[in-house]
Amino acid sequence: MQLLRRGDSGPAVVEIRSTLRRFGLLGDSPESPGDDRFDHAVEQAVRAFQQQRGLITDGLVGPATYRALREAGWTLGDRMLALMISAPMSGDDVVALQERLLELGYNPGRPGGVFDEQTEAALRKFQREYGLVPDGLCGPATLRSLRQLGRKVTGGRPHLLREQELLRQAGPRLRGKRIVVDPGHGGPDRGIMAAGVAEADLMWDLARRLVGRMTATGMDAMLSRQEDTCPAETDRAAFANNAGADLVLSLHTDANRSMHAQGLATFHFGNGSGSTSTVGEALAGFIQRELLTRTAMYDCRTQGRTWELLRLTRMPTVRVEIGYLSHIGDRKRLLDPAFRDVVAEGILVAVKRLYLLGQDDQPTGTFTFSDVLARELERGAQAI
């Protein structure tokens, strides 16, 4: 779809206004329901919706915002839900189904709002155990049963508890942990370009440095793409899911029209309404603190988002935005191989901190690659 912004008009804007009005974000007067102007009020309503949904609050309606507006219009029971391989069903009704299954003790994975194979498997299991036809379809009979039953899981949001328990069970050793490192863009998609420097090239180099260090510790580290390819976000998520990864680390840089924009930001899955990857948030925080201490970059904070890779992966996923190529200082840092080594070490140490769960830790910025290697060798000897 075309990008819609303030000043635009037409049938698409009428649809946007109608949707925002339905969500209570736009107070159109009764006599102007067919208004087709994208004015200041619409822009502010779009920004409010984007903030609620963990999207970039730019007031523009692009593909991500349009999809979120469309998905937010569904409530559980509005339509039959089923697994559609070619075009998976998504929306708030799928989130509600996933969260209900989690409350009942079934595991559809993270409630990201996409009806995938894991959601279907959890639904079939529920249907079998409650005497329903296990067809994997969420129709009227299944919906009645879901609504009649009480919670089995208490004491917190089930998907958050499950993530935390899996982390605890994983243990402190890095050996055997499967990590997907995702260098942004690639191939013909160069990403951010500034002064002849391409984001795709810098992130490919950084990813190779990070994978090398992870492999040395015994981790099973793999790249989501080749140097000359650029998979779609959905394909990158599918790669990680099919590989059974424990974590995904997506590497990017940013740009801005302002030459003063600079700094480091990390992102984890979070939809702004309570559904958050707690382990992803913890890892994003570790990465943010390690890199800030080691590089003295400007702190652009850790934030929840619903971007496709964060939403579609079944494991904790963190996107790291390392500086702005449009900023002279950040670009100079990124062009320095020694700086990229520092970033790779900081991310590796952050992953180690995540699995240590606060035990036998050291102050932020003091852990080194050599320390991590030594501890892995020590723990390996103890295991023998």
Image (spheres, grey):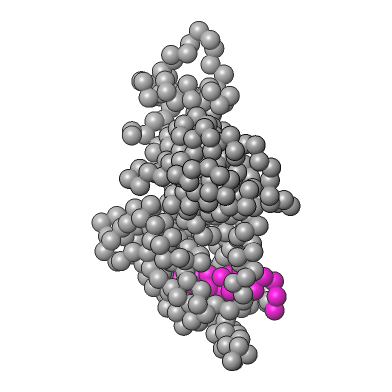
Q: Is residue 33 left or right of residue 3?
A: right
Residue 203: x and y in percent read 39, 64
Q: Which residues are magenta?
A: 340-360
Q: Residue furthest right?
A: 155
Residue 305's place in the image compared with 165, above or below, is above
Between 123 and 375, the one lying in front of the other is 123
Instruction: Name the quadrant of the C terminus.
Output: bottom right
Residue 54: x and y in percent read 54, 43
Q: Residue furthest top?
A: 31
Residue drawn where x is 44% and y is 49% of the image: 116
Between 272 and 286, the one lying in front of the other is 272
Q: State which quadrant residue 62 falls in.
A: top left
Tell me if residue 139 can be seen. yes
Q: Is residue 335 left or right of residue 356?
A: left
Residue 220: x and y in percent read 45, 75
Residue drawn where x is 52% and y is 80% of the image: 175
Residue drawn where x is 26% and y is 64% of the image: 228
Residue 42: x and y in percent read 49, 25
In the image, is residue 356 part of the stretch drawn in magenta? Answer: yes
Between 141 and 370, the one lying in front of the other is 141
In the image, is residue 341 part of the stretch drawn in magenta? Answer: yes
Q: Predominant secondary structure in magenta?
A: helix
Q: Is residue 112 left or right of residue 237?
A: right
Tell me if residue 251 can be seen. no
Residue drawn where x is 33% and y is 33% of the image: 2
Between 161 and 378, the one lying in front of the other is 161
Instruction: Name the quadrant of the N terminus.
Output: top left
Q: How many marks?
A: 0
